[in-house]
């Protein structure tokens, strides 16, 4: 695992730049933006590190870290693109898509969508620490949570500002989620598997815990 000291060293320059930029421009948004860039870099390092460790042990990526975290990061950084003054200029006409969206949100939107697909198509269970939950159940919960959040976010802002532009990343995630739920959820039911034994779940849980 990447040591916390190394992560702190990585984060410190962004903190310093954020403080300087924020003070010079009298903007908390600029300060927060640099902090978020540092956190994004740390998240990315952690994800690649966990991917490498899981491959070394030939273990599937059916943990909450790989399923939930990328979606959360992608959604949050997409929304932050509206408020940042750094790389936040819109590149398209009818929808919002900036360099910030492309660099910091788009990769996680794609990865999160693929992880959501795997909940329905590839995995049997998703591990939340020591607890195993059916992958399809997790897939449905995440899918409907994403849909409800995006619709609520858009309706709330559009009711205040009619010139509010839809975010391209969120639109892509919305369409992908609907497609995944319909094609691989409702209309594609897998054959039922034999009940998972306690010993199997315990062994898989120990393996997952050793990787995190």
Image (tube, rainbow, N blue to C red):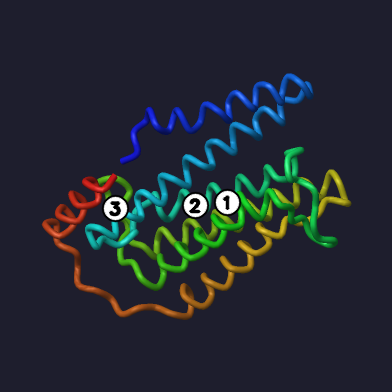
Vertical placement of residue 165 versus 183, above or below = above
Q: Quadrant of the N terminus?
A: top left
The residue labelled by disc 3 is: 53
Q: Earlier in the sequence, mark 1 or mark 3?
A: 3
Vertical placement of residue 102 versus 7, above or below = below
Q: Earlier in the sequence, mark 3 or mark 2?
A: 3
The residue labelled by disc 1 is: 74
Circle 1 SS class: helix
Circle 2 SS class: helix
207 or 116, nearer to the observer: 207
98 or 145, nearer to the observer: 98
Q: Is the residue marked by circle 3 packed among few (<14), some (14-19), or many (20+) residues within 10 Å? A: some
What is the C-alpha distance between the residues marked 1 and 2? Answer: 6 Å
Circle 3 SS class: helix
Residue drawn at x 59%, y 36% is 36
The residue labelled by disc 2 is: 70
What is the C-alpha distance between the residues marked 1 and 3? Answer: 23 Å
Q: Are marks 1 and 2 in contact (CB under 8 Å)?
A: yes
Q: How many marks?
A: 3
């Amino acid at each position: 695992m990447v040591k916390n000291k190394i992560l702190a060293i990585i984060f410190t320059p962004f903190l310093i730049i954020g403080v300087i930029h924020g003070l010079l421009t009298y903007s908390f948004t600029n300060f927060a933006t640099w902090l978020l860039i540092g956190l994004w870099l740390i998240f990315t390092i952690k994800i690649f590190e966990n991917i490498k460790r899981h491959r070394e042990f030939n273990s599937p990526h059916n943990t909450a870290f790989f399923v939930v975290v990328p979606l959360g990061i992608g959604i949050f950084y997409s929304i932050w693109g509206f408020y940042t003054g750094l790389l936040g200029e819109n590149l398209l006409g009818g929808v919002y898509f900036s360099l910030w969206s492309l660099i910091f949100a788009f990769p996680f939107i794609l990865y999160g969508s693929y992880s959501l697909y795997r909940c329905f198509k590839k995995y049997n269970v998703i591990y939340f620490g020591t607890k195993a939950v059916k992958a399809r159940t997790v897939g449905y919960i995440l899918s409907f949570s994403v849909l409800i959040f995006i619709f609520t976010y858009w309706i709330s802002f559009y009711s205040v500002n009619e010139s509010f532009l839809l975010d391209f990343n969120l639109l892509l995630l919305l369409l992908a989620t609907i497609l995944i739920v319909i094609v691989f959820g409702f209309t594609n039911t897998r054959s039922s598997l034999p009940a998972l034994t306690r010993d199997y779940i315990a062994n898989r849980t120990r393996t997952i815990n050793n990787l995190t």
